[in-house]
Every structure is written in C-alpha cells, then in structure tokens.
Image (spheres, rainbow, N blue to C red):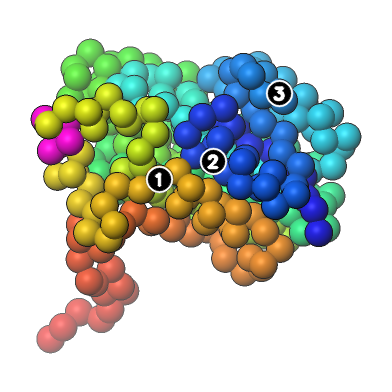
Amino acid sequence: MTRTYVITGSASGIGAATADLLRSQGHTVIGVDLAGVEVDGDLSTPTGRAAAARDAVQAGDGGIDAVIACAGIAAPIAKTMAINYFGVTEFLTALLPTLSLADQPRAAVVSSMASLQPVSAELVDAALNGDEALALQIGDQLATSPEAGFLNYSSSKRALSRWVRRESVSSAWAGAGIPLNAVAPGTVTTAMTAGLLGSPEGLAQVDAAVPMPLNYHQPASSIAELLAWLTSPANTHMAGQTIYCDGGADAVLRGDDIWSWNDAPRS
C-alpha cells in the first residue's frame, strides 16, 4: 500500500535520508524545506508555517497519510526554538485536520539526545505555554553567552519531547487514532555536524556529551528506518514516546534504573 508523506527538512540530513527511503519503497513524499523540494517553506515564523502547511495539503491533493518533522537547527540563538519547537508543533497542528481524514494516519518528529541535557526551565515553560514571543525574548538573553546560548537547542528539544508526550494522548491525536512519537538520535554524521566532528576538540566534546558504545556515530539512515516504521500502519499503539536511537548513550547517561520514580519509599 502506497502512502503520502509530508517531510520537513527533506533537503538534507535525516529528512533527506527519510525521503529517499520512503520513495524507494514506492511512497509519495512531499518535501518541505527552504528551497529545492516540493514545498518551499520557512518554518521559523507563524506566517511561514501556515503557508507551508497549506501548500503541503495542496501538493497532496488534500490527502496526507503521515507527517515526519525533521527540520531543525542547532545554533545557540533564539531562532533555534522558533524552528525546532514552534516550527514543528504549529506545522503539525495545522496539518492535523487533513491528517485526521486518512485511514491510518501517523506522525513523528525528531527530538535529540540534547533533551536529556541541561535546559532553561523558563524557556521550556514558555514554549509549552505557546508563548513564542516570550520564548524568543528568553532565547535572545541566553544567546549573549556562548555557553548559555546552547540552552536554546537543548530546551527546544526538551520542550518538543514533552509536547509529544502531552499531545499524543489527547483527543486531537489519540482520539483521532493518530500515533504521535519522537525519535532522539545520538551523534548523526550529517553536514550539520561535520564541522564539529572535524576537529579533535569538537570530537572529544561531542563524545563526552553523547557516549555511543554501540557502533559509535550513526548515519542518517539509521534514524530514517525508525521514522519510517513509526509512521507506517504497523505502528498501532506506540504513543508519546521519545525513542533514543543513540548507540546506547541514554543508557550510559541515565543508568539502569529509570523506573524507581514511582516506587514506595524504602523503610
């Protein structure tokens, strides 16, 4: 059965790998990116998101079976939150009425291992409250310091994973029979990471933050395969999960017990 997919960030990296994989399986892919794909769209602004969603629906002749949101940047600036969080959540929400009409609708987004790293709680709260103006204001303040500026990225991914968890069980998503999930990659070898991985200092920094004992750094195709399954008819009950496809980094960093939060206190 062939399906119609909308994929943001499809011009490069994980988005391009996912688009290539799905096309090789015979599916129709409507790519959304700044240029060079089926829909030119700027997801950094409310106007751009609305226009991109409208054009994607039109490109699909009003029929969309799945949405995969891969577009994102990792810059230490406020615009990172605009693209990584609002550019995902507002775009998916705009496509929800059309997606709900499909026989087996699915949606997945790309989060990050950075969702487990330090964040700005104030910035995460602003995002989850839907206050983009405040989020950008906080992000601009953080960007005045290189170290604090990175919190724009980790906070955008933490907020995105929390949004997926919150919305996945709502009447709008679960109630419409739409599995909504996230994938959190480890270190992926793409054009976006090439500069950082190209120096011994950058490589050491990355590997300290994201230790990957299983097969080390991963190609974009490893994430594409998982995104394809999450948005296939085979996924019927997975909801709200951020799946850490990361070479074991999550297991190294959080250890073997992430369940005891709900245990009774020991006497």
Q: Is residue 67 above or below residue 147?
A: below
- Residue 266 location (% of width, % of height): 16, 83
Residue 203 is one of the magenta-drawn residues: yes
Amino acid type of the residue tagged 1 in the rendering: Pro
Amino acid type of the residue tagged 3 in the rendering: Val
Which label number is shown at residue 219? 1
**Image marks 1 and 2: residues in contact by CB distance under 8 Å:** yes
Residue 173 visible from this viewpoint: no
Q: Secondary structure at mark 2?
A: helix
Density class for disc 1 (Cα within 10 Å; few <14, some 14-19, many ≥20) is some
- Judge by depth and name the residue closer to the eye, 198 or 137: 198
Q: Secondary structure at mark 3?
A: strand
Density class for disc 2 (Cα within 10 Å; few <14, some 14-19, many ≥20) is many
Q: Residue furthest bottom?
A: 267
- Residue 170 location (% of width, % of height): 63, 56
Q: Is residue 89 above or below residue 230?
A: above
Residue at 38% in and 56% down: 244
**Residue topped by disc 3:** 39
How many angstroms separate mark 2 from mark 3 (CA)?
Answer: 17 Å
